[in-house]
Image (cartoon, rainbow, N blue to C red):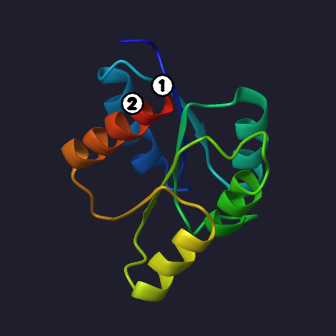
Amino acid sequence: MAEYTILVVEDEPEIADLLKKRLEANGYKALIAYDGLTALSVARKAMPDLIILDLMLPKMDGYSVSRMLKFDKKYREIPIIILTAKTRENDKRLGDEVGADLYMTKPFDSESLLKAIRELLSKKN
């Protein structure tokens, strides 16, 4: 498997670390950003193959990060999985509107997340 780079955007260090370890154990390179502004900067510099994005973030929320990347032709092909505690239908609809490829809620099943990552990355190639 080619090494894919995944950007994890999560303001809770424990969750970010758990995701990073799980991704690396499955052969992915993982980058972490703890706030929305850093996420945008890292995404633009590193051009990750996929982004796992929380919505409730300091400095800039996940909706804004997704919107700014998905509506820029240079970055719009990067798949974004929103991973959040927000479960209302309105939140999911907003996720669609800002271009997210998938909306998953916390608590999450690691195997389901890994399967979704594999599926989205297989569509890129």
Does residue 120 appear in the picture of this structure?
A: yes
- What residue is shown with label 2? 122
Q: Is residue 5 above or below residue 52?
A: above
Looking at the picture, which amino acid does disc 2 mark? Ser
Which residue is at the front of the view, 59 or 110? 110
**Residue 118: x, y in percent?**
33, 34
In the displayed structure image, the side of residue 3 where residue 114 appears, left or right:
left
- What residue is shown with label 1? 125
In the displayed structure image, the side of residue 35 where residue 44 appears, left or right:
right
**Residue 124: x, y in percent?**
50, 32
Asked which secondary structure carries label 1, the reply is: loop
Q: Is residue 2 above or below residue 101?
A: above
Q: CA distance from mark 1 to mark 2?
A: 6 Å
Does residue 20 appear in the picture of this structure?
A: no
Which residue shows up at 43% across the image and 77% down it? 86
Which residue shows up at 67% across the image and 55% down it? 35
In the displayed structure image, the side of residue 94 where residue 38 appears, left or right:
right
Which residue shows up at 48% across the image and 55% down it? 101
* Mark 1 vs 2: CB contact within 8 A: yes
Which residue is at the front of the view, 112 or 70? 70
Tag 1: Cα neighbours inside 10 Å, few (<14), some, or many (≥20)?
A: few
Q: Is residue 87 above or below residue 41?
A: below
**Residue 83: x, y in percent?**
43, 59
**Residue 43: x, y in percent?**
70, 39
Looking at the picture, which amino acid does disc 1 mark? Asn
Which residue is at the front of the view, 10 or 118? 118
Asked which secondary structure carries label 2, the reply is: helix
Query: Residue 71's mark?
Result: none
